[in-house]
Image (cartoon, rainbow, N blue to C red):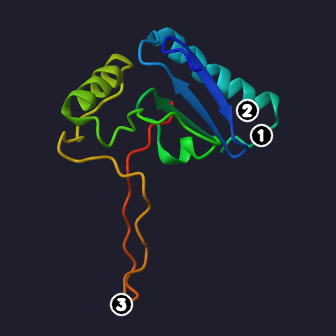
Amino acid sequence: MLENNKCYLLDCGAEIFIWVGRVTQVDERKAASKVAEDFIISQNRPKTTRITQVIQGYETHSYKSNFESWPVGTATGTSGGEEGRGKVAALLKQQGIDIKGLSKGSPLNDEVPPLLEGGGKLEVSYSLLLIL
């Protein structure tokens, strides 16, 4: 149902997702971000409401979990390979996002690792989240 040349907003209360079609123009992507920000203000939501941009074919589990079903056979970004990563990097670079420090061999992990290990030691880790 989602067209690959458009952007869509998904309101999940504490988080707003911006779904971006693969061939959406950069100015339309920026406009979608502005619409999301204006929506948060118009709904009197906290300024801390998260806005997450999701690129077509690289939908996260947290995004897809908001739907009863998701079409089978669509890419999720974890099996897209080097070609898919290159396309995403090109899109991000086109938007003016600095992609230094992202190695092509390090996959993005959608799962949250446990914070406490067996000995009660606290492990702090982070993953990349693009908020535009």
Q: In front: 78, or 34?
A: 78
Q: Is residue 118 left or right of residue 85?
A: right
Residue under label 3, please give it.
119
Measure the C-alpha gap from mark 2 to mark 3: 42 Å
* The image quarter in which residue 89 lies: top left
Q: Considering the numbered disc 3 on the image, is that residue within a helix, a strand or a loop? A: loop
Residue under label 1, please give it.
45
Q: Is residue 74 left or right of residue 35?
A: left
Residue at the spot 28% in from the left edge and 21% down from the top edge:
90
**Tally of marks:** 3
Residue 40, numbered label: 2
Q: Residue furthest front?
A: 72
Q: Considering the numbered disc 2 on the image, is that residue within a helix, a strand or a loop? A: helix
Residue at the spot 66% in from the left edge and 32% down from the top edge:
10
Q: Residues within 10 Å of mark 3 (few under 14, many from 20)?
A: few
Q: Amino acid at mark 3?
A: Gly
Measure the C-alpha gap from mark 1 to mark 3: 40 Å
Mark 2 / mark 3, whichever is N-terminal? 2
Q: Is residue 24 left or right of residue 91?
A: right
Numbered disc in front, either 2 or 3: 3
Residue at the spot 33% in from the left edge and 47% down from the top edge:
108
Mark 1 / mark 2, whichever is N-terminal? 2
Q: Amino acid at mark 2?
A: Ile
